[in-house]
């Protein structure tokens, strides 16, 4: 088994939608497709939950899954990443994104530097992937963290402004991308970012990382 072949198979995927059923529950078709590829290439699924405070702790992960194993939705359905893989004692985190446009939806999160994001687009009927560190600069991330902190301060400040009928404003932190460079499939660095992921994975396969 080579992880490089897994990522090449992922890159060849067409658009896969995540549907919200009438019951209000999500059908994680995109994540299921990735999980099936991991299984088809010989990785073993270990059903275990990871406390959120340990989700990015490599030493903790190495103590609960062996090389060749992966965890699916380790912190539940609402928290990234979707997968944690132990491959040759390297911990790899994957987060799946699916959207009709060429831009992922981030909601109240922002890209994490070491995560590999797998993004499928209906507009292009195609898949791409990239490291979080390659799409968001550290100074931009710092400003988003600052904005979230200020929003939380406003939430506290206006929490109890109406003792009669309980009116108050709602402050919800949400991250979006705008402008001409927000389309991941038209961006000039698309192929370069994919190549960086494949180079990293190949270096693990070849024992160079």
Image (spheres, rainbow, N blue to C red):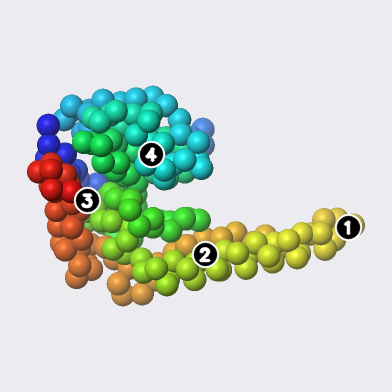
Mark nearer the N terminus (2 vs 4): 4
Q: According to the image, label 1 marks what residue?
A: 163
Location of the N terminus by quadrant is top left
Tell me if mark 2 has few (under 14), some (14-19) or many (20+) residues whose alpha carbon lies within 10 angstroms of its own: some
Residue 62 placement: quadrant: top left
Q: Secondary structure at mark 3?
A: strand
Mark pair 3, 2: CA separation: 29 Å
In front: label 1 or label 4: 4
Return the mark for residue 145.
2
Return the mark for residue 59.
4
Q: Secondary structure at mark 1?
A: loop
User: Taking 145 as reference, is 47 left or right?
Assistant: left
Nearer-the-camera pick, 180 or 51: 51
Mark nearer the N terminus (3 vs 2): 3
Image height of 105 relative to 37, above or below = below
Q: According to the image, label 3 marks what residue?
A: 127
In front: label 1 or label 2: 2
Residue 189 placement: quadrant: bottom left
Q: Are marks 1 and 4 in contact (CB under 8 Å)?
A: no
Horizontal and vertical percent position of residue 173: 56, 60
Mark pair 2, 4: CA separation: 26 Å
Mark pair 1, 2: CA separation: 31 Å
Horizontal and vertical percent position of residue 86: 28, 35
Residue at (56% x, 68% y) in the render: 147
Return the mark for residue 125.
none
Tell me if mark 4 has few (under 14), some (14-19) or many (20+) residues whose alpha carbon lies within 10 angstroms of its own: few
User: Taking 95 as reference, is 188 left or right?
Assistant: left
Q: Are marks 1 and 2 in contact (CB under 8 Å)?
A: no
Mark nearer the N terminus (1 vs 3): 3
Mark nearer the N terminus (3 vs 4): 4
User: Taking 1 as reference, is 110 left or right?
Assistant: right
């Amino acid at each position: 088994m080579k992880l490089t072949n897994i990522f090449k198979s992922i890159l060849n995927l067409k658009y896969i939608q995540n549907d919200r059923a009438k019951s209000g529950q999500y059908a994680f078709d995109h994540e299921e497709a990735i999980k099936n590829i991991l299984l088809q290439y010989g990785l073993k699924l270990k059903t275990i939950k990871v406390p959120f405070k340990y989700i990015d702790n490599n030493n903790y992960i190495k103590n609960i899954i062996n090389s060749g194993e992966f965890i699916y939705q380790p912190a539940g359905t609402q928290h990234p990443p979707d997968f944690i893989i132990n491959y040759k004692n390297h911990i790899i985190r994957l987060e799946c994104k699916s959207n009709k446009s060429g831009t992922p939806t981030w909601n109240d999160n922002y890209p994490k530097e070491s995560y590999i994001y797998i993004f499928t687009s209906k507009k292009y009927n195609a898949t791409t992937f990239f490291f979080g560190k390659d799409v968001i600069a550290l100074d931009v991330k710092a400003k988003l963290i600052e904005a979230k902190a200020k929003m939380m301060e406003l939430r506290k400040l206006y929490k109890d402004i109406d003792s009669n009928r309980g009116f108050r404003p709602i402050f919800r932190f949400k991250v979006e991308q705008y402008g001409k460079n927000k389309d991941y499939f038209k961006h000039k660095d698309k192929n370069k970012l994919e190549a960086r992921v494949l180079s990293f994975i190949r270096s693990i396969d070849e024992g160079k990382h």
